[in-house]
Amino acid sequence: MRRTYFLPAFLSVAVAALLLPASPASAGLLAPESGGSPNADRIASLYWIIFAIALVVFIVVEGALIYSLVKFRKRKDGVAEQIRGNTKLEIGWTLGAAVILVALAAVTFVKLDGIRTPENSGANGLDLADGVIASSTGPGSELRLPPNGRSLNICVNGQQYVWRYTYDQPDCTKNDFKAVYSYEELVVPTDTTVTLDITAQDVAHSWWVPKLGGKFDAVPGYVNHTWFKIPASKAGTVFTGNCAELCGRGHANMTARVKALRPAEYTAWLAKQKAAIAAANKGAETGRKKFDPTS
Amino acid sequence: MAATVTEPTSPAIPQIVARRVDPPKEQGWTSWFTTTDHKRIGILYMVTTFVFFLMGGVEALMMRLQLGTPDNTLLTPETYNALFTMHGTTMVFLFVVPMMAGFANYFVPLMIGARDMAFPKLNALSYWLLLSGGIVFYASLFFSPPEAGWTMYTPLSSIAYSPTGGVDAWIFLIHLTGISSLIGAINLYATIANMRAPGMGWGRLPLFVWTILTYAVLLILALPVVAAAVTMLLTDRHFGTHFFDPTQGGSPLLWQHLFWFFGHPEVYIMVLPGFGIISEVLPVFARKPIFGYKAIAASTVTIAFLGLLVWAHHMFSTPSPTVVLVFFMLGSFLIAVPTGVKIFNWIATLWRGQIEYTTALLFCVGFIGTFTMGGITGIFLAVFPVDWQLTDTYFVVAHLHYVLMGGAVFGIFAGIYYWFPKITGRMLSEGMGKVSFALMLVGFHVTFLIQHSAGLSGMPRRVYEYSDTGHLVLYNRISTLGSFILALGILVTTINVLRSYKKGPIAGPDPWKGNTLEWFTTSPPPVNNFDVVPRVRSVEPMKDIRRQVARNGAPHEHEPGPGRESLIHS
């Protein structure tokens, strides 16, 4: 049987992989990407716990299956034992399965808060003033703030087929035409907790930069939330991701980039972007007036 | 019956008590249009859905060809999007669900000792509605096929973003196949509830029939919801309503809830009958009774019940409150318990058996091994923080194919190899069957195991192209290679079926020494199935009959012998 060749091969690969520590090399092959933010790292570590339990279950079940197939193949004059069941055994494996799942649920609950709730910005992060950050609370997932209540909130808006980021806008549901914005590439300061208000203006999209944590759907009419905090050591890194919800013909080409800058560089970039937008607006206004003096 | 009685090893015993009496012979090819015989309708179902399976397979191969090369320009994005929409819709609505209906049509009446389904004309209507649904849907190929995926998420499927008629063709497919399945389910339920052989209480119902009963109940509960949802989508698109339109106070998430309230039970609608086939085939070739009949029957019902309560685990990344996510995570965990019970019971059925390696048994074993892996990756996906990384990536594509290909398709192939002799009277080639199995198993795992890694590396599903980053090219090449091995395996079975239909060795009534009543009649069975329906005394009536025949010598035609107690069923 081919299965007997295939499975041991797979098993040895899987065991070898587990013996390696959850190294970055195995990310992508056996585990989700991480390394850009604590929540992504915590998802990966939760993943590895499940992986270990799953591997044991896998080996036990497939092992029992293969053992039975080899051991109990038809023999000459062999007689099959007419066993109809065994209540104790059956209760045993029902409870066994239940216990494993209770354990998994417990681990998930322990890890959940660190993944879902943002942590405070680091000492070298962008200086965030108290009470500046307001955020929209539309229907959708609850907004979560770090314990100290301060995060850099950025509005993320999905549209066919590009992401739009608005940086200094207190309420993401109300368009502020003076706010600084950028398309496709999100620029953020390192060591600073960034919270995102994610929505969409046409069809559903899904925000996903694997190394910065899980994906969150951008659904028109709803606001979704996530956060990340890029360590200072990653300054200058650009993280990439794809839109993860089918949004039409250009879905495959709807990419996102997140560029991490040191806080001072970030502030400088923000000012430069603001000036560039103002200049562009002014140019547009001049152009409009030229064609239509009444405007 | 004592648990330790072994099967008599006497030579093959003729057990036929059905004679070909005055069959109102249906003549000519036109009779296929007018037939109400459950067996002929079953054959129509099986042949039609297998053709759809091959079409869906070709669509899959075209997608794999496109993804075999990064930044490929072989297919345009609109073609690619249409292909995965057609592939998903075909496999779910035109292959797996109706294929199970085909098996149920043919074998439920035979297994419970009935002459036909409860409502033969309704049965014919079911089939013709299914076929019309398939034709309406595939006709969109000549205009503009739908491109929004088989889940048809709004607002992408709304008139503003999908202005062509493809989505409407899909809506009509859902309605036509939905009505087909709904009346089919009612028919199966009525048949199973009312037309069982004397002595066949609920505790003696074959496990395949248990799963079909559950399949029918799930269809009856889930289909009206999707029928309502697609009607709302239709009125949104053409008659000015705004159920799913966020700009007018509608909710795109409402669509997702309604769709998955149907869509998740649909997964169990697809795999439970596969479980049933496994539960019939395994004991026959392990030469042992099924281990824990009651536990398997009970876990079928439990899975169906829990399957109605976990739909939002398809929506973990949507804007939803944490408490909702937790509820659906725990619900999904719960389903793993009865599923695990089934897998352990199947392995225990093999334990201390005398396993005969027929092709049907091999497909069952492939089913258990593969489905287990799909179940395990399902646990990863049930933990919602982990799901945030995995959902909508190739990890999910791999998971769902492990569950549906491993769970339903291998089950269907086991059923084909097990029941083909009964349907046609001829055996399939075991040699070709084993080659087919080997190619399918290897091809399947080569195709889909590596897709987990593609997803973990950040490749979303439903993308027509990807750039050459990391190992994505390697992963996709492996997957494409595997898909062609898998296709070759399916081709071998297709050839096997076509060839054996004319040339296979004559099967006789009971080539496998089966346990259930379909082996009590000729192969193929006469129009009336049985002249005499035996009194059922256990879950394995054929074992009892063989034993009685061995004890009494030659079988009696119409005269019930002392230990026989046959009952004339007219």
Image (cartoon, coloured by chain):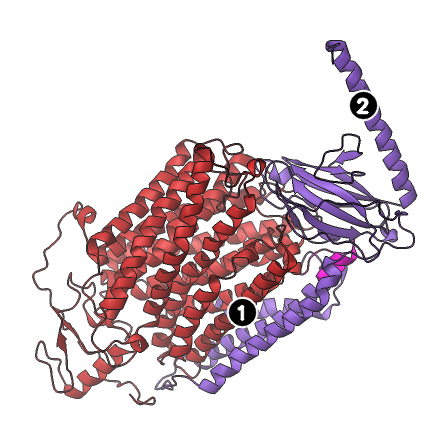
Chain colours: A purple, B red
Q: Mark 1 lies on which chain?
A: B
The percent coordinates of residue A167 (x first, y second) are 79, 39
Mark 1 vs mark 2, CA separation in Å: 57 Å
The percent coordinates of residue B190 (x first, y second) are 26, 63
Task: Using a 10 Å C-alpha cutoff, classify the residue at mark 2 as few (fewer than 14 neighbours), some (14 to 19) or many (20 or more).
Answer: few
Question: In the image shown, does B197 or B182 lie closer to the viewer?
Answer: B182
Amino acid under disc 1:
Leu
What residue do we see at 58% from left, 48% from top?
A: B461
Residue A34 sits inside the magenta stretch: yes
What residue do we see at 8% from left, 64% from top?
A: B21
User: Residue A279 lies in what quarter of the image?
Assistant: top right
Can residue B87 be seen here? yes
Question: In the image shown, does B229 or B240 lie closer to the viewer?
Answer: B240
Question: In the image shown, does B290 or B365 lie closer to the viewer?
Answer: B290
Q: Is residue A262 left or right of residue A139?
A: right
Looking at the picture, do discs 1 and 2 lie on one chain?
A: no
Question: In the image shown, does A169 or B472 lie closer to the viewer?
Answer: A169
For residue B93, above or below residue A45: above
The percent coordinates of residue A91 (x first, y second) are 49, 82
Residue A106 sits inside the magenta stretch: no
Amino acid under disc 2:
Ala
Can residue B11 be seen here? no
Q: Is residue A87 left or right of residue A136?
A: left
For residue B293, above or below residue B140: below
Task: Using a 10 Å C-alpha cutoff, classify the residue at mark 1 as few (fewer than 14 neighbours), some (14 to 19) or many (20 or more).
Answer: many
Q: What stretch is highlighted in magenta?
A: A31-44
- Residue placed under numbered mark 2 in the picture: A280
- Residue placed under numbered mark 1 in the picture: B334
Q: Residue A63 carries which label?
A: none
Instruction: Confirm or deny contact between disc 1 and disc 2 (CB under 8 A).
Output: no
